[in-house]
Image (cartoon, grey):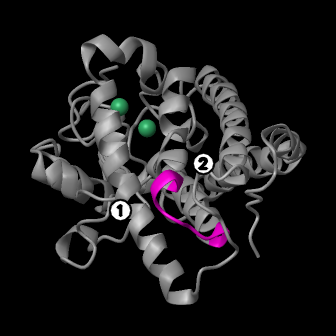
Amino acid sequence: MSIRLNSVPADEAFIASLEHIPYMAAFDFGRYLIAATTMFVVGWLLKKTIWGYRQIQPRLADSSDYRREFFASLRTCAVFVVAGVGISFGIRTGFLQEVQISLGLWRDVATFAAIIVAHDAYFYWTHRAMHHPRLFKRFHRLHHRSVTPTPFAAYAFDVPEAIVMVAFMPLWLFFVPTAATVISGFLAFMIIRNVMGHAGLELHARWWLNTPLTSWINTTTHHDLHHCGGFNRNYGLYFTWWDRMMGTEHEDYGKEFASNVARPKKAAGGPTSVRVSATA
Ligand SMILES: [Zn+2]
Ligand SMILES: [Zn+2]
């Protein structure tokens, strides 16, 4: 079933896109609220029960951190909804690629893998660019106010960064026909990995970095280091390969990960062994 209506005049396509705002708002706000809240609750339960030793930083986020992350993320969701109107309009008028429910199982699987790999590259390079001193303050400073990130930091972006983040979708759809199920799956995958990266406790198995089967997949420690003590390293979102190729992986990543999954982890209340400072 195609949702593109190429023959629809621009004004009708625009009105039809506006009519989809409630659905897009439910999806954009809903996935953030569900993923961040679920990760927060799961992380809190794990910390209180079997995985207290896996808490990455001795410091806890305070209420002002939660408030800032939450409201900035809601604003990002609003930016996503506005962008969604533009994307819907682009699809309906034929400027962007046709979107169907499915393009066939194997093609959908291949497209899903490709969009994850492409988005990882897009994220690495735009993220790294936003760390340039000329761009950092306007684009990325807000996200780094979370020195001890929580799952609610997932979309804690200033408006320019939110626009950079959402720009991936129309860019992709300009070139690649993609099934609606793949887009939904990709957005779900993105928010799940995003909240895991900001979870505050290491969620991955103790052997994660010891096997080539998983060592190229980011852990929570990887992104946590980017927020605390590794400001100019560990830019990647899903995979470690761009950081490794470009020499931006934190030199103590392996040691930090091992420390975070070791049982018992730290002397009471003491800082982690190699975390040097909270750089923001
Ligand atoms: Zn950053
Ligand atoms: Zn982050």
Quadrant in the picture for residue 225: top left
Taking the spot 73% from the left edge, 52% from the top edge, the residue there is 92
Please state which of the two labelled residues, at mark 1 or mark 2, is closer to the viewer. 2
Q: Amino acid at mark 2?
A: Phe
Query: Any mark on residue 65, and which?
Result: none
Helix, strand, or loop for circle 1?
helix
Q: Amino acid at mark 1?
A: Val
Can the viewer see residue 153 in this picture? yes
Query: Which residues, given as a range, are shown in magenta?
Result: 173-181
**Nearer-the-camera pick, 63 or 2:** 2
Cα–Cα span, label 1 and label 2? 24 Å
Sequence-wise, the earlier of marks 1 and 2 is: 2
**Nearer-the-camera pick, 14 or 65:** 14
Ligand 2 is within 8 Å of the C-beta of the residue at disc 1: no
Rendered-image quarter of ligand 1: top left
Quarter occupied by the N terminus: bottom right
> In the rendered image, which residue does mark 1 sit on?
117
Q: Is residue 177 magenta?
A: yes
Label 1 Cα crowd, 10 Å radius (few <14 / some 14-19 / many 20+): some
Quarter occupied by the C terminus: top left
Q: Is residue 216 left or right of residue 202?
A: left
Residue 133 at x, y = what percent?
Answer: 26, 14
> In the rendered image, which residue does mark 2 sit on?
95
Quadrant in the picture for residue 246: top left
Quadrant in the picture for residue 114: bottom left
Taking the spot 78% from the left edge, 40% from the top edge, the residue there is 10
Label 2 Cα crowd, 10 Å radius (few <14 / some 14-19 / many 20+): some
